[in-house]
Image (spheres, helix red, strand yellow):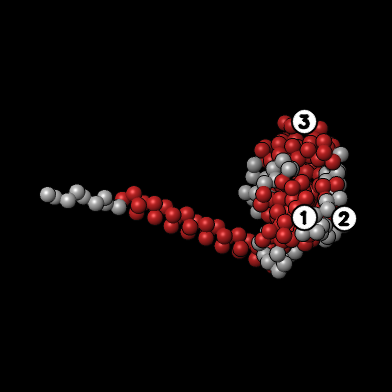
Amino acid sequence: MDITMRLAQQPEADELLGRSPLAALVGMLLDQQVPMEWAFSGPYTIARRMGGDDLDAHAIAAYDPEAFAALLSEKPAVHRYPGSMAKRVQQLCAYLVEHYDGDAAALWADAGTGAELLKRLKDLPGFGEQKARIFLALLGKQLGVRPEGWREAAGDYGEADVYRSAADITGPESLARVRAHKQEMKAAAKTKTQAQAQAQTRTQTKPRPGKAKG
């Protein structure tokens, strides 16, 4: 795999994402509660601090947990929560070592269908339903991994010509459109929550019918 990506918006970090399956997977893992560019530049920062030009699942899994957390915590930190994310990265790599001999690409190399690949991704530590579907869409849209039914398995994220997630980012313009979409979704969710709270309040304060006087 040697593909041009623009998720980190940083040439060296994007170059690593394009050629390293593990870097792309770790970037996806880190993509929560921080800007996408910060998350996807994380694998490059980790590799550099470990003294290499790529990530190694065996080396990360075997790394002393406290030392690895300290490595991610060095300024600039790899994540807003470097300690907890260091643990998740090590859990992910340990899983890959146990089940795929440390080869992240083996996750999708022989996946016969999109549904099968989605299940494998959901089995990964730190990958819930949404994250698994987004990464499946990223594999299909940008990395050429397209088992039968991959778009359907990725759900809304697999649709063509949309700007919903990291799978759709190919440069600054698409990044801005994805970010705008996320803000719209947050605003819609907030409005829905407020409406539900108001409806519940009205129900609770509604006067009960009084007894008829005889």
Residue 67 in percent (x, y) is at 75, 32
Whether residue 180 sits left or right of residue 65 in the image: it is: left
* Amino acid under disc 2: Met
Is residue 122 depicted above or below 161 in this figure?
Answer: above
Residue 151 in percent (x, y) is at 74, 61
What is the CA distance from the residue labelled 1 to the residue labelled 2?
Answer: 19 Å
Is residue 90 depicted above or below 150 in this figure?
Answer: above
Residue 157 in percent (x, y) is at 69, 60
Identify residue for label 2.
Answer: 1
Identify residue for label 1.
Answer: 114
Q: What residue is drawn where x is 67% and y is 61%?
A: 156
Identify residue for label 3.
Answer: 64
Element on which disc 1 rests = helix
Of the image marks 1 and 3, the number of the one nearer the N terminus: 3
Q: Is residue 44 visible in this depiction of the protein?
A: no
Frontmost residue, 146 versus 44? 146
What is the CA distance from the residue labelled 2 to the residue labelled 3?
Answer: 30 Å
How many C-alpha atoms fall within 10 Å of the one at disc 1: few (<14), some, or many (≥20)?
many
* Amino acid under disc 3: Asp
* Amino acid under disc 1: Gly
What is the CA distance from the residue labelled 1 to the residue labelled 3?
Answer: 36 Å
